[in-house]
């Protein structure tokens, strides 16, 4: 009692000991030309949840008017990566600059770039703010790997937002990576 199998049919028939026909699906054979040589690390679910949590908290902050608010114009890059859109927001007056930087960084979603934190410092003599970005050790990307559009979204949004706030009277914004000048 032989069973014929179509050439491209992935279902094979087998004869059971008690004369019942069983059908089983055979997995497709891997193509040796498309089999990956090494497995790429999978992003940690914890990192994904942390990023999502930061984004939700940043978006929620926009909905809450702080007790002692100050208006800030937030510059965000449009979807075509051509121009900045201005959005008025309210941030707490104490540490308004730091709160604004925190909000911008929390809302940036750059694939596989994980920031572990940042520090800001202000030089009153030169009226310069330095933002020291801290890339997490487990980040799959570094700041130097950002595309021009990603650079504009992250660094350009920070620079435009900070320089265009008349109350802060800033003349320059510089970026460092763990204390080293950022060269992109």
Image: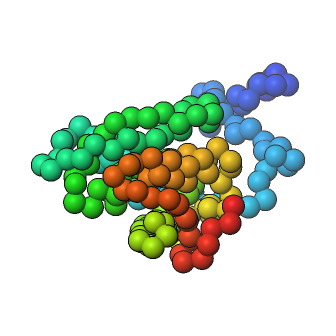
In the visual, does 106 lie left or right of 126? left
Residue pushed farthest left? 67
**Protein image colouring:** rainbow
Does residue 60 appear in this view? no
Residue located at (48% from left, 33% from top): 85
In x, y percent, where is residue 92?
Answer: 22, 52
Quadrant hosting residue 82: top right
Image height of 145 relative to 86, above or below: below
Image quadrant in which the N terminus is located: top right
Quadrant hosting residue 24: top right
Image height of 39 relative to 103, above or below: below
Residue pushed farthest front? 125
In x, y percent, where is residue 111?
Answer: 57, 49
In x, y percent, where is residue 162?
Answer: 44, 53
In the visual, does 92 lie left or right of 160? left
Quadrant hosting residue 105: bottom left
Residue located at (22% from left, 60% from top): 94
Q: Total label count?
A: 0
In the visual, does 34 lie left or right of 80? right
In x, y percent, where is residue 44?
Answer: 48, 59
Between 112 and 175, the one lying in front of the other is 175
Image height of 148 relative to 88, above or below: below
Does residue 94 appear in this view? yes
Image quadrant in which the C terminus is located: bottom right
Residue pushed farthest bottom? 179
Residue located at (79% from left, 50% from top): 35
Residue located at (58% from left, 34% from top): 83
Between 136 and 20, the one lying in front of the other is 136
């Amino acid at each position: 009692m032989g069973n014929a199998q179509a050439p491209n049919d992935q279902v094979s028939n087998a004869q059971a000991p008690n004369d019942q026909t069983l059908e089983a699906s055979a997995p497709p054979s891997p193509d040796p030309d498309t089999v990956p040589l090494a497995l790429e690390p999978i992003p940690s679910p914890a990192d994904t949840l942390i990023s999502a949590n930061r984004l939700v908290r940043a978006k929620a902050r926009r909905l809450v008017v702080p007790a002692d608010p100050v208006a800030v114009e937030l510059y965000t890059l449009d979807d075509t990566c051509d121009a900045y859109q201005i959005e008025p927001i309210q941030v707490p007056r104490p540490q308004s600059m730091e709160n604004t930087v925190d909000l911008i960084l929390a809302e940036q979603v750059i694939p596989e770039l994980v920031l572990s934190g940042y520090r800001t410092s202000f030089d009153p003599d030169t009226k310069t703010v330095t933002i020291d970005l801290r890339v997490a050790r487990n980040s799959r990307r570094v700041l130097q790997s950002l595309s021009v559009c990603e650079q504009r979204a992250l660094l350009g949004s920070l620079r435009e937002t900070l320089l265009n706030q008349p109350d802060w009277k800033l003349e320059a914004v510089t970026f460092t990576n763990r204390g080293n000048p950022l060269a992109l």
